[in-house]
Amino acid sequence: MTRDELKALIRTVPDFPAPGIHFRDITTLIADGRGLAASIDHMAKLAPPAIAAVAGIEARGFIFGAALAIRLGVGFIPVRKAGKLPVQPIGVDYALEYAEARIEIDPMLVGEGEKILLVDDLIATGGTAMAAAQLLQQAGAVCETALFLVDLPQLGGAERLREAGISSHSLMEFAGH
Ligand code: AMP
């Protein structure tokens, strides 16, 4: 399945969760078995060599991140929303478009100097991915590459990651918000 065919499986929901936002809904893609498998095929081709683990961002980043980790034969590290981890986590607060959020990881899951690939379904402003990369780096990881299914380039997230030394790759782009 081509990237354009995958793009056609994404459902756009206007004005969700706020007026003016075009929500790019991946549930229609993952409900399609061939679409889900092809997404992971394409992401695996973009993964850098010799990574120690994949880190996925809750919640949709768990779907693609865990499947990709299995494909690459490495472990999976969940980047969780605040208050979910049963151990003492490290966390970071960051700004969303209309709110504040906090994500956390268990630093014990990260080995010093390990190369970790960051995965989420979509990059918009890049705030979430930057926060996740900072946390992984704080835990001792080398986080230099991030993979997304969807990029909204007009929101500048991929550029923001690049400026921080993290190369960003995606399977498709959508214009606007
Ligand atoms: P950001 O931190 O601005 O890059 O936002 C990325 C996070 O918010 C990802 O975890 C996405 O799942 C979600 N997100 C932001 N904008 C959208 C959108 N237009 N459609 C679907 N998900 C979005």
Image (cartoon, rainbow, N blue to C red):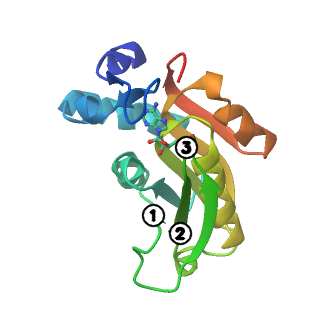
Callouts 2 and 1 close, C-beta under 8 Å:
yes
Identify the secondary structure beneath mark 2: strand
The kind of residue tagged 1 is Lys
Q: Tell me: 62 left or right of 43.
A: left
Residue at image location 37% in from the left, 53% down from the top: 59
Identify the secondary structure beneath mark 1: strand
Residue 15 rendering spot, x and y as whole percentages: 38, 25
Residue highlighted by disc 3 = 98
Residue highlighted by disc 1 = 81
CA–CA distance between discs 3 and 1?
Answer: 17 Å
Q: Earlier in the sequence, mark 3 or mark 2?
A: 3
Using the image, determine if residue 84 lies above or below residue 41: below
Residue at image location 61% in from the left, 75% down from the top: 111
The kind of residue tagged 3 is Tyr
Using the image, determine if residue 24 lies above or below residue 49: above
Q: Nearer the viewer, residue 117 or 96?
A: 96
The kind of residue tagged 2 is Glu
Kindly tell me whether residue 122 is visible in this rendering: yes
Using the image, determine if residue 106 lies above or below residue 43: below
CA–CA distance between discs 3 and 2?
Answer: 20 Å
Quadrant for the N terminus in the image: top left
